[in-house]
Amino acid sequence: MFDLTVEDYSLWGETGVVLQVGRYRIQVSTEIPSVSRHLSELYAKDCFDKVDGNIDFHVSLKASKGFRRWFRKQVVFTFDGYTPFLPLPFNQAPALFEWGLNWCIANHSHQYLVVHAAAIEKNGVTIIFPGTPGSGKSTLCASLVCSGWRLLSDEMALISVDTGMVHALARPISLKNESIHIIKHFFPENAMGEVVNDTAKGSVSHLRPPDESVINVLLPAKPTHVIFPKYMKGSETLLKKTRKGRALLKVAENCFNYNVLGDKGFELLSQTIDRCKCYEFNYEKLEEALIVMDGLD
Amino acid sequence: MKANSFLSAMGSLFFYIDGDEVVIYSSITGDTHLVDLETAKVLKKLNLDSMKYSDFLVYLADQHACIIDSELESYSKVLIEELKSLDLIDIN
């Protein structure tokens, strides 16, 4: 975290601050203190210092106009002057920034196959965790990166169409509901943003990624494992091989731009699945889950 | 089904073979399907060559090492209907 003054916040609103996230540069304009605080607390200083090249996304978060300035205040996200979402309650501004950035990346990154998945790496083992909401992928991903794995991405695995490598984003990890308490309990020393309640996804908070992940964000990783996690109360920790054809089908269902890439997307996904070991993973106890993941080769 | 009805794959099909299961991607619909190996072989054939229904029956009989009879005809119709419902083949 680095210090911000009130003057800094207002400057962000006038000219915007430029944020480097992986290979993307985002100009953020906002006068909303909770968003500025979110950025300064959950993004490493490197993200602000090592900005180089043209801006990819111009985004702003502003309080809505009209009578909504006084009554049930709202926040509006805009991208290059376009408003892709309906306004949200004002207290959800930091979460809206992250969701808006997800939208920007997912819709403007066709040099990648964009998979709705977490991705992590350690000692040459790179795991892609595709997952539907509630599967426990973010909880597992957060636990692993708090235990020495490198965060590539919590929300979107970016597989390069040219090389098949996974490119990193190393953005804050979005945690919801019960997983907020679980991660706070197991990893109290890791910085988390404020908890925003009553969003469409329930309570939401973000975990700051480890600095090492941000420092190494430009290092791509070769995918070696595709694992479909499933958090189940009362479940034994069970890693079970799954058929590659079925894995391919499931990953395809979790892609944002599979149809945009067409047959290129299918061939890239086929090659990725072919070179990876594919598993289903049921777990309840995080300690056991971490041991299983550390044992992968 | 008329003997001179023409069967062809819808657009271009792409295949990923996993033992006795095959994932098929259709360039026309953008959909991905999981089918058994036998069905995939039929689609692969139709992806390369369009053929008359009468020739298709000959091809199926050859694949299954059997004669063309009412049982094979029923099977062919079920298969064609299923593939048509998935927008994987076209009948003219």
Image (cartoon, rainbow, N blue to C red):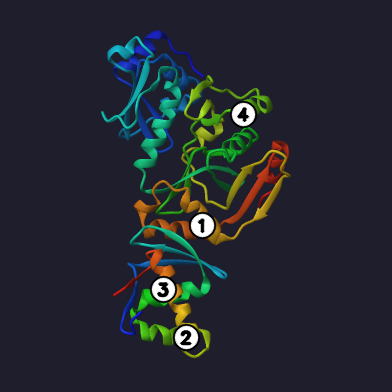
Q: Disc 1 to disc 2, how far (Cα)?
A: 37 Å
The amino acid on which the numbered mark 3 sits, given as a three-letter code, is: Ile
Counting residues from the N terminus, which is met first, the one under dot 2 or under dot 3?
2
Q: Name which residue lies at 62% across and 32% down.
A: A146
The amino acid on which the numbered mark 2 sits, given as a three-letter code, is: Ser
Both marks 4 and 3 on one chain: no
The amino acid on which the numbered mark 1 sits, given as a three-letter code, is: Leu
Q: Disc 3 to disc 1, how far (Cα)?
A: 25 Å
Residues at circles 1 and 2 in contact by the CB criterion of under 8 Å: no
Mark linked to residue A121? none
Residues at circles 4 and 3 in contact by the CB criterion of under 8 Å: no
Q: Name which residue lies at 47% across and 13% down.
A: A3
Indicate the chain on which mark 3 is placed: B
| Mark 3 residue crowding within 10 angstroms, few (<14) / some (14–19) / many (20+) | many
Q: Which residue is mark 2?
A: B70
Q: Can residue A125 be seen in the rendering of this structure?
A: no
Counting residues from the N terminus, which is met first, the one under dot 4 or under dot 1?
4
Q: Is residue A255 above or below residue B71?
A: above
